[in-house]
Each structure stands twice: as structure tokens, then as C-alpha cells.
Image: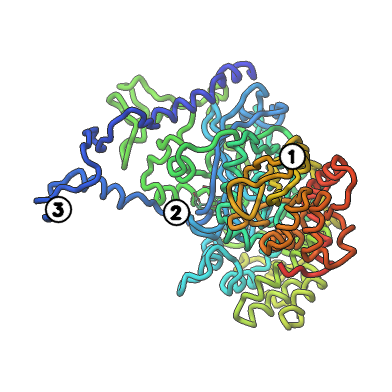
């Protein structure tokens, strides 16, 4: 069977590309035309009655052009409006045939084309990439059994347990309705008002306040399917499954102060990073992992598998790595591809199925509905980026912008006039989708399950699993967010709620707000079945069966690699070209990217009289856009940089954001002149490298230091005025 599938999958990628190309345009050697194909002889002037006269209504060319322009915008996504995407492929390491009949997860010879889109949630389409926010991680697999969408986030849990609360959550998060402030930020009253009344959100709040919410790159963040799904095999046997994407570059973030700076210096930071990585052949990669749970183990955990505010600690169920996603092609047209792609958790293939997670169940309605208003027609599946690579046959007809020319007399089933086509794929071997035969024997209720009442156990587990710097960042993020809240009662309710996660955390946050954390009030705010005891539905804390989970901390994900890291080389006239070239070579050999930053654009003269091209001047460059800084040898260069406030600011800021800084020979004088130099002990501090006799040793240590990503312990030492 696997063999057959493999044959069917041959050339899938080529077919998809060809499919898209039918709708692409190449204007080379072509005349400008109207949308009707009429050649245009003047695209500069409208038709007028005399050269100084009024424009004529008759000007159909002007009217066609302006009409199209007037309608260029479509409604942006209500959430996840800001994003970027790329093409790629998915390869399977090991057949999952035992667990699922999904063809693309059965046959290791199949290369499945994909399109992935990453996004923030709160901001508008033009908002900054570096907002503190959850990141969307959506992947459309163009499989031989139809499109499969895994529409996840970079956080494995969600704020709410039931889709009924989604519009409330989003209304609270979005800019406030009376003045449309603030853009792309959760640090405002309505968000925290809502959260303070929704204790179930506390686990996700911990993640959203952690550095996970300010990733260094989309290429350096995890992805999660969030809900528990099902794998169903050929025999109809089901396993519960949680999906994980693990980036091969490790999971890394920036500092909050840095994030705010990047938002000003380069609001497209993540978009640009993904684009450039693909353009330079540094294809982003993630491994797909699954946690598999036997049907019979459904109730063996202290949490409910259907509760989307819970994760399954990897210590309880290990993540099995089954394949790899590679993004290797940028879009040709952002609107046609990234903006028009329509994801939906209900785009399934045989062998993958839903569970009754009430958040997932609501999503199954929302996504098609939103595409109707965003893309304007039930024919959105005909837009090239949304088309499956397999043929579509059904009796759906007409509608706005229908592309398909359906032939024949019949558009109904059953029929004899059309030879009975298209047929139902009724027998198993025909590959039709069948829902898992789940037994449901229940009363109709509008309530939650009692198994959903633990709101704090895993919030505490997450907090306990963080390294000290990660914990400090959560405290500071909460101080920032709640500090922006204007209503004292909301701040108080929040710090009270935080006591349920961790008393120390609550006290630290409260102290900075001039408050004392007290006991939270958590009235149960929903109905319970008529025959139930409301007490059983009170929010509570169930202690996690493990104290901490290594996988929840980013600190353990260092990959000892500097692949694609951006290193700033600060230089001026009189730089020692041997010193510069040696470090550049050593860094690039390890896959890092270097840029020479100097006082002016153009060229600088080296000690040996060479002209060295400058990539950026200090006017354009900013340390927040780099991962590390190097100052080469050269007395005149060092003297010029020492006298340049922008160069010193660059170093101070890199130091403040805990980045690796290295200097060769006289380059150390520039560090000496910066804030670092004012404190003798910092010269020997981890991550600040100077005073080396051997350039090779300096390069080796610098490479190691960059691979550590950040020296967060530096934050504790002193505050740099950068
Ligand atoms: Fe959603 C978009 C992820 C809950 C309703 N969602 C959207 C996108 C992602 C997610 C990544 C952007 C897709 C893209 O790139 O185009 N959403 C999630 C996750 C959730 C979740 C991981 C919880 C586990 N979403 C959720 C609920 C609802 C929605 C409960 C409604 C009941 N989401 C939508 C939407 C969006 C959307 C309104 C906006 C644009 C779109 O669908 O295409 O339908």
C-alpha cells in the first residue's frame, strides 16, 4: 500500500508549482494592457476635453484602473492579521502507519509541499513584529489526500477553555473601542480586566509574559497544535496526539527593552529575518514531534486531555520526532500567497481526527466563516494558494468569482445522467474520510466539565520550570503590563490571582505596583447542570505530578551553533584588515553573517591601505538588530570609534542586552571607553572578550560565547545607561 501511495506522490511539488504558475504573470517583453487585454498607449494621462480641460467620463481606462485600486484591500484577519509566510516541504523520518492512515505520515519517500505562515495575534496588518504576543504557526500540507492544515501557536496552551469566550478574549485584547489604543499590545486595562476575571487563563498568561512572547526569530521558536487531536489507523484504532514543531536552531528570544527598540528600528524584523534566511539559502527547519496517548490512558493524567489550557509534560509522554519541515522558497507575491492563504483546523485528511475539546469544536465553525468575509466568496478554495494538489470533484456550483468551468448536465447526486459521477468513496480502500467512531452517550448541557476546574497547577509547573533569568523576565513583564493598567482594582485583582501561581512572583509584582498581594476572589461564573453541586465547579489548584519540566524552559535548548546569527563589526579608517578578515572568516565558516559598520557609508581605509566596503553606517545600524559585536584591531580605527558616541552607544546597548562582545588588540580600548570599561571586573566578565594574544583563540571563544545566545546573568550586575 505504501508503495502505491509513493507512486501517487511523485512530482507532487512540481505539480503544485505548475498549478500556481497558471496564474502567474511575467511582464517581460510585454505591452501594458487593460484587464481586457487592450494595449494602452499612454499610462500617464487621463482623457480630457482639451489639454487644460475636464476629464471625460468616457475614460474607461482610467475608470478601470481607479476602480481596481479602490478595491485593493480586503478585510484583514480579525486575529493574526500581521504575519508572513513561505513555501517548503515536509519529509517523514519514520512511518506512522501503526497510528494513522494519513498517507503523508505513512510513506517516508513522500515529500509533501507546504506553505507556512507565522503571525502575531493582536496587531493590525501593519503593526510591529516584536510586540509581546503569542505567535501563530500555521502549516498547510498539500497532500495527495487533500489539504491538511495544522493551525497552531508557539505556545502549547490557550487562554480559554471554550470557544464561547473567544470573541470576549479578542475584544479585551484588541485596541480599546473608544479610542483604538493601544496597537499590538496587551498592556492595557481591558485585557487585564478580562484576564483578572478568567483564572483559567493563568497558565497561558505565564507563557505570554515569558520571553516566548518576544522571539529572536520565527526560525527560533517552537510550534504546537495545542489541542489534543486523534490519529486513527487503517483498523480504525485511535490514539490521542499532540503536535510539536521543534526548531533546529533552538528556541531563543530577545530582551524586552530590545524588542521595544526593534519595533522602532525595524518593525519588519521577523519578516525580514525569514525572508533573508531563505534568500541566502539558510533554509529554516523544524522537526515535527508527536506525543501519542493510548485511548485507554485518556483519564490517567491529573488534567483533562480535552482541556486546551493544559499541556502534557514531556516527562509524562515523550515527544517522538517523526519528520522535518523545511522552508525553501519565498513568495512571489505577498498578497496572492500569504494574505490570501486560508487556514482551517477542519481541513483534515483521513487518519487525523478531532477530539471534543470545546475550543477546537468552536474553531471548526469559525475559520470557514471568517474566510467568507475576508476572501468574499465560498470559492476561496479556488485561489491558487488554497487549491489542493489533487483534483476536486463535487456538485458545488457557481458563486462569486467561480473559476472552475464544470462541464456536463448534472450537478446533483445521485444521478444517472452523469453516469452517477462523482461517486462517494464508500469503501475503505477508496480512501474516503470517515470520522472516528466515538461513542457519545450524554445529557445536553451548557456547562464545563468538572475536570476543567484546575486553573493553576500547570501555571505553577511552568513558572517552576524556568531558569532564574526567565523567572525574572516574567516578573518584569507583569510589572510592565500591569503598570500600564490605569484602574487600580484591576491591578489588585491580578496580583491576588498571581498568588495562586506563586506567592513570591505575586509579591514581587505587587511591590513594584505599590500593592500587597491578597487572597483572590474567584466566584464561579457559569451555570452547572441542574443535578450537580456548584461547589464541584469552583476554580481550584491541582498540584502537578512533576515539580518541573525541562522542556518548558528555553535555557535548555542551546544548540551550540551560531548558524545565521548576525554579527556587527565596528570599524573606522585605520582598521587592521588582517584582524577584521580573520574574524569575519572564522564567523562565516560557522554560518554566521557579518556586517561592517562604520561612521560613514562607502569605504574605510585599512592599515595596509585596502579599501574595505562599509555595509551600514551608525545612522542606519542599531545593536538591537545584531546578535553580537566585534571590534577589530587597529589603533586609528579604535581612536575614531572611542570618540564616536554612536559606536559607544552600540556597545553599551549590546552589553545591556547581554550579548557577546569581543575586541582584538587596540579594539579593546573602545570597550574601555564604553560603560563596560568603567568597571574593571566587567573586563573579565563572561561574554566580554578582550586582551587575547591569539586571534584564533579569540575567535574560538567568541564563537562559543555567541552560541550561548545571551549572558542574562549580566542583568543582575548593574544597569547600563544605554
Ligand atoms: Fe484561531 C486565525 C491559531 C483559537 C478563530 N488562529 C488563526 C491563525 C492561527 C490561529 C495561527 C492564523 C492563521 C493564518 O496564518 O492565516 N486559534 C489558533 C489557536 C487557537 C485558536 C492555536 C487555540 C488553540 N481561533 C481560535 C478560536 C477561534 C479562532 C477559539 C474562534 C472560535 N482564528 C480564528 C479566526 C481566524 C483565526 C477568526 C482569523 C483569520 C483566520 O481565522 O483565517 O477564524
Look at the picture and state if 224 lies above or below 436. Answer: below
Q: Residue at x 86, y 57 (%)?
A: 547
Provide the residue designation for mark 1.
581
Q: Is residue 451 left or right of residue 269?
A: right
Closest to the observer, 101 or 412: 101
- Give coordinates of residue 26: x percent, y percent: 38, 30
Closest to the observer, 78 or 390: 78
Provide the residue designation for mark 3.
55
Find out whether the residues at labels 2 and 3 contact each other: C-beta distance under 8 Å.
no
- Give coordinates of residue 523: x percent, y percent: 66, 75
Residue most toward the left? 49
Look at the picture and state if 154 lies above or below 453. Answer: above
Pick whichever of labels 2 and 1 is earlier in the sequence.
2
Answer yes or no: disc 3 within 8 Å of ligand 1.
no
Provide the residue designation for mark 2.
76
Please say whether residue 636 is visible from this viewpoint: yes
Secondary structure type for disc 2: loop
Crowd band around label 2 with a 10 angstrom C-alpha radius: few (<14), some (14–19), many (20+): some
Marks 2 and 1, how far apart in space? 47 Å
Secondary structure type for disc 1: helix
- Give coordinates of residue 510: x percent, y percent: 75, 78
Look at the picture and state if 330 lies above or below 172. Answer: above
Crowd band around label 3 with a 10 angstrom C-alpha radius: few (<14), some (14–19), many (20+): some
Q: Nearer the viewer, mark 1 or mark 3?
A: 1
Crowd band around label 1 with a 10 angstrom C-alpha radius: few (<14), some (14–19), many (20+): few
Q: Is residue 57 left or right of residue 15?
A: left
Amino acid at each position: 500500500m505504501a508503495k502505491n501511495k509513493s507512486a501517487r506522490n511523485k512530482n507532487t511539488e512540481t505539480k503544485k508549482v505548475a498549478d500556481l504558475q497558471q496564474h502567474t504573470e511575467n511582464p517581460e517583453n510585454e505591452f501594458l494592457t487593460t484587464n481586457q487585454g487592450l494595449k494602452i498607449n499612454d499610462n500617464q494621462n487621463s482623457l480630457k476635453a482639451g489639454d487644460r480641460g475636464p476629464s471625460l467620463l468616457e475614460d474607461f481606462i482610467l475608470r478601470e484602473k481607479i476602480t481596481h485600486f479602490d478595491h485593493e484591500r480586503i478585510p484583514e484577519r480579525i486575529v493574526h492579521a500581521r504575519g508572513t509566510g513561505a513555501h517548503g516541504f515536509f519529509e517523514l523520518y519514520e512511518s506512522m502507519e501503526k497510528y494513522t492512515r494519513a498517507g503523508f505520515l505513512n510513506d517516508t519517500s513522500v515529500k509533501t509541499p507546504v506553505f507556512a505562515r507565522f503571525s502575531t495575534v493582536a496587531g493590525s496588518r501593519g503593526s510591529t513584529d516584536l510586540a509581546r504576543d503569542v505567535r501563530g504557526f500555521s502549516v498547510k500540507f498539500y497532500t495527495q489526500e487533500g489539504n491538511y492544515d495544522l493551525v497552531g501557536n508557539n505556545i502549547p496552551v490557550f487562554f480559554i477553555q471554550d470557544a464561547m469566550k473567544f470573541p470576549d478574549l479578542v475584544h479585551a485584547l484588541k485596541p480599546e473601542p473608544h479610542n483604538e489604543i493601544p496597537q499590538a499590545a496587551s498592556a492595557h486595562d481591558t485585557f487585564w480586566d478580562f484576564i483578572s476575571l478568567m483564572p483559567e487563563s493563568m497558565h497561558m498568561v505565564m507563557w505570554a509574559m515569558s520571553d516566548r512572547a518576544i522571539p529572536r526569530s520565527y526560525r527560533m521558536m517552537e510550534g504546537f497544535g495545542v489541542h489534543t487531536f486523534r490519529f486513527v489507523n487503517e483498523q480504525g484504532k485511535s490514539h490521542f496526539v499532540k503536535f510539536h514543531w521543534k526548531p533546529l536552531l533552538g528556541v531563543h528570544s530577545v530582551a524586552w527593552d530590545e524588542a521595544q527598540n526593534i519595533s522602532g528600528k525595524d518593525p519588519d524584523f521577523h519578516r525580514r529575518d525569514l525572508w533573508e534566511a531563505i534568500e541566502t539559502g539558510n533554509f529554516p527547519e523544524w522537526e515535527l514531534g508527536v506525543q501519542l496517548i493510548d485511548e485507554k490512558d485518556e483519564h490517567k493524567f491529573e488534567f483533562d486531555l480535552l482541556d486546551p489550557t493544559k499541556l502534557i509534560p514531556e516527562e509524562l509522554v515523550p515527544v517522538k520526532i517523526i519528520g522535518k519541515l523545511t522552508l525553501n522558497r519565498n513568495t512571489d507575491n505577498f498578497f496572492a500567497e500569504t494574505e490570501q492563504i486560508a487556514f482551517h483546523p477542519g481541513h483534515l485528511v483521513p487518519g487525523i481526527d478531532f477530539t471534543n475539546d470545546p475550543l477546537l469544536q468552536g474553531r471548526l465553525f469559525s475559520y470557514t466563516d471568517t474566510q467568507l468575509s475576508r476572501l468574499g466568496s465560498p470559492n476561496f478554495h479556488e485561489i491558487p494558494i488554497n487549491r489542493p494538489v489533487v483534483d476536486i470533484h463535487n456538485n458545488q456550483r457557481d458563486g462569486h468569482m467561480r473559476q472552475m468551468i464544470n462541464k456536463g448536465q448534472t450537478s446533483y447526486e445521485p444521478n444517472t445522467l452523469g453516469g452517477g459521477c462523482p461517486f462517494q468513496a464508500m469503501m475503505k480502500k477508496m480512501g474516503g474520510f470517515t470520522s472516528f467512531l466515538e461513542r457519545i452517550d450524554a445529557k445536553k448541557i451548557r456547562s464545563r466539565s468538572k475536570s476543567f476546574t484546575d486553573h493553576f497547577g500547570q501555571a505553577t509547573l511552568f513558572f517552576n520550570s524556568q531558569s532564574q533569568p526567565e523567572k525574572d523576565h516574567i516578573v518584569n513583564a507583569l510589572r510592565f503590563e500591569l503598570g500600564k493598567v490605569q484602574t487600580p482594582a484591576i491591578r489588585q485583582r491580578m496580583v491576588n490571582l498571581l498568588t495562586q501561581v506563586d506567592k513570591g512572583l505575586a509579591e514581587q509584582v505587587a511591590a513594584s505596583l505599590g500593592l500587597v498581594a491578597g487572597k483572590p476572589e474567584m466566584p464561579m461564573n457559569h451555570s452547572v447542570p441542574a443535578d450537580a453541586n456548584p461547589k464541584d465547579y469552583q476554580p481550584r489548584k491541582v498540584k502537578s505530578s512533576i515539580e518541573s519540566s525541562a522542556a518548558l524552559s528555553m535555557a535548555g535548548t542551546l544548540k551550540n551553533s551560531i548558524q545565521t546569527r548576525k554579527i556587527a563589526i565596528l570599524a573606522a579608517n585605520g582598521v587592521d584588515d588582517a584582524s577584521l578578515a580573520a574574524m569575519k572568516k572564522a564567523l562565516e565558516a560557522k554560518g554566521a553573517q557579518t556586517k561592517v559598520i562604520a561612521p560613514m557609508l562607502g569605504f574605510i581605509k585599512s592599515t595596509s591601505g585596502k579599501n574595505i566596503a562599509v555595509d551600514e553606517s551608525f545612522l542606519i545600524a542599531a545593536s538591537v538588530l545584531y546578535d553580537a559585536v566585534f571590534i577589530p584591531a587597529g589603533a586609528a580605527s579604535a581612536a575614531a570609534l572611542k570618540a564616536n558616541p554612536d559606536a559607544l552607544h552600540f556597545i553599551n546597548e549590546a552589553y545591556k542586552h547581554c550579548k557577546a562582545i569581543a575586541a582584538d588588540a587596540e579594539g579593546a580600548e573602545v570597550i574601555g571607553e564604553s560603560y563596560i570599561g568603567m568597571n574593571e571586573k566587567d573586563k573579565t566578565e563572561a561574554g566580554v572578550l578582550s586582551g587575547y594574544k591569539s586571534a584564533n583563540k579569540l575567535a574560538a571563544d567568541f564563537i562559543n560565547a555567541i552560541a550561548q545566545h545571551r549572558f542574562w546573568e549580566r542583568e543582575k550586575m548593574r544597569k547600563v545607561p544605554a
